[in-house]
Image (tube, rainbow, N blue to C red):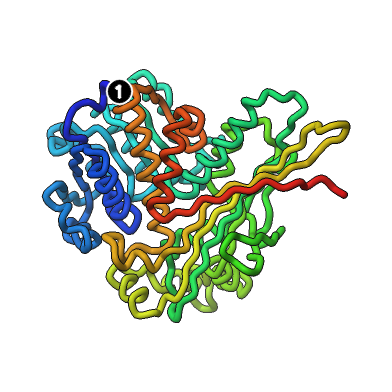
Amino acid sequence: MTSQSLQAEPLTVVFFGLGAVGSSMLICLAELAERDGVCLRFVVVVLEPELARDVLFHAEWLFDRIDFVGVADFDRFFQCSHAERDRLAGAQVLVNAAHPRFNQPMLQLGLELGAHAVDLASDMYDAETERTLTFSQYSLDQAYRERGRAALINFGISPGVTNFLIGLRLHQLRAARRRDLEIESVDLYLLEDIDADEIVFSWSPLVALEELAERPRLLRNGRLQVLEPFSAAREHTFPGEITPTRQYPLYQEELLSLHRSFPEIESIGVYSGGSEVELVKALFKLNLLSKRTLPQQSELTVEAMVRAILPGMNKPRRIEDYLRNGVIRRAHFAAAAEIRYTEQVRSDRQKTIETVGVSYLRYQGLLKSPYAGATYISYPTAVGAAILAWHALAFLREDGGELEGIITGEDLARLLPRARAEAIRRDLVAWDIDLFESVRDATPV
């Protein structure tokens, strides 16, 4: 996409779905636009407009900039005629904040409208991705390039910001052009930890069960290894934590994305740990995620029963009450990527581990902000997506740059100039997402 494609004012952003992440992302985009003097208008396409208004209960000042569009069914909406999409006329950016299965229909719509697109996650378990180990969005890469538009995929805090930070460092190491420098591995560690008097899911419980109970995969020595759930555990100590956290392999977008971008790196892994992971692990170890059927009820599996009785994700007003009343005492999201490489130093090979990451520990601060009611996961996810997408657009609008095709976080790190990358880092910190990095010698003594 080119700078000319973003000159018209106001800038119109269309959201499909407006849950915990989408609402906070919309607010963050509005704040960024106000700061930068950009006129921003939103169209929100949802199944129930009143519920969408309710999740913005601390941001009602934005309602005069939002056109709420109620639809009976997303599938039918994406398949409808052009006449039924009149309210999307002039849209320049489409955001899938509903579900990954709508990525492809939204991208097709983006091509028809001549709009750019943003999604927050990919469907890791669809048949095509399982077969090709490639995200389905790449099937439209050439079409977006020919249209002069960009699709920013897997944006959020992780993947998204994590891949951006990893990409920044890996591209710098590549640029050094040291023939003796060899990047051996990248391992990403995630912390999702909450201390509360109630069971509070920060993410959809069903999504958590699907991700954590799937057989995890790691890239080791150039081959994708499939492991048993909750096996091959490691320990990792995150900034802000006194003791190490048990980490378990997890199959997430970061692995496939980094492997595609940096095929020369033979070992890549994603691990996750914390209270929410330990809860799912307990269910798994008690065989409560078993596919076995119940005695005398052959139509009902143990897993289906557990899914049916698990508490759902709390609504924003309830989350805010929990935080205000002390039910949620502490919450911490963090992501730390360890980049391990060797190079010739003096007469010896030196092994180095560089760590880059993010930490969100200021959850109590949301009580005095328009984001009150977001979870400690949805807030950094939304803010990360908004800041990355906003600076990609600013690169076009202000810097006269070009972005085309399917673009991931690590792609953005390569394509943006250094000043723009630094602006992203400053904005993350301004929105209470701490950044950390370190370098240590890991050469055996």
Q: Residue at x 66, y 43 (%)?
A: 339
Q: Nearer the viewer, residue 155 or 395?
A: 395
Note whether 401 is above or below 375 in the view shown: above
* Quadrant of the rendering where the N terminus is positioned: top left
Q: Is residue 388 left or right of residue 294?
A: left
Q: Is residue 366 left or right of residue 414?
A: left
Q: Position of residue 401 (x, y in %)?
A: 37, 23
Note whether 341 is above or below 21 in the view shown: above
Q: Is residue 139 left or right of residue 71?
A: right
Note whether 229 is above or below 165 in the view shown: below
Q: Is residue 249 left or right of residue 168?
A: right
Does residue 101 show up?
no
Residue where numbered disc 1 is placed: 3
How crowded is the residue under tag 1: few (<14 C-alpha within 10 Å), some, or many (20+)? some
Q: Residue at x 82, y 45 (%)?
A: 443
Q: Secondary structure at mark 1?
A: helix
**Three-letter code for the amino acid on which mark 1 is drawn:** Ser
Does residue 365 show up?
yes
Q: Nearer the viewer, residue 440 or 81?
A: 440
Q: Nearer the viewer, residue 201 or 64?
A: 64
Q: Nearer the viewer, residue 280 or 362?
A: 362
Give residue 235's quadrant in the image.
bottom right
Q: Position of residue 132 (x, y in %)?
A: 56, 35
Q: Position of residue 394 (x, y in %)?
A: 33, 32
Q: Residue at x 38, y 22 (%)?
A: 402
Q: How many marks?
A: 1
Give residue 50's quadrant in the image.
bottom left
Q: Position of residue 411 (x, y in %)?
A: 49, 32
Note whether 246 is above or below 175 in the view shown: below
Q: Residue at x 59, y 52 (%)?
A: 336
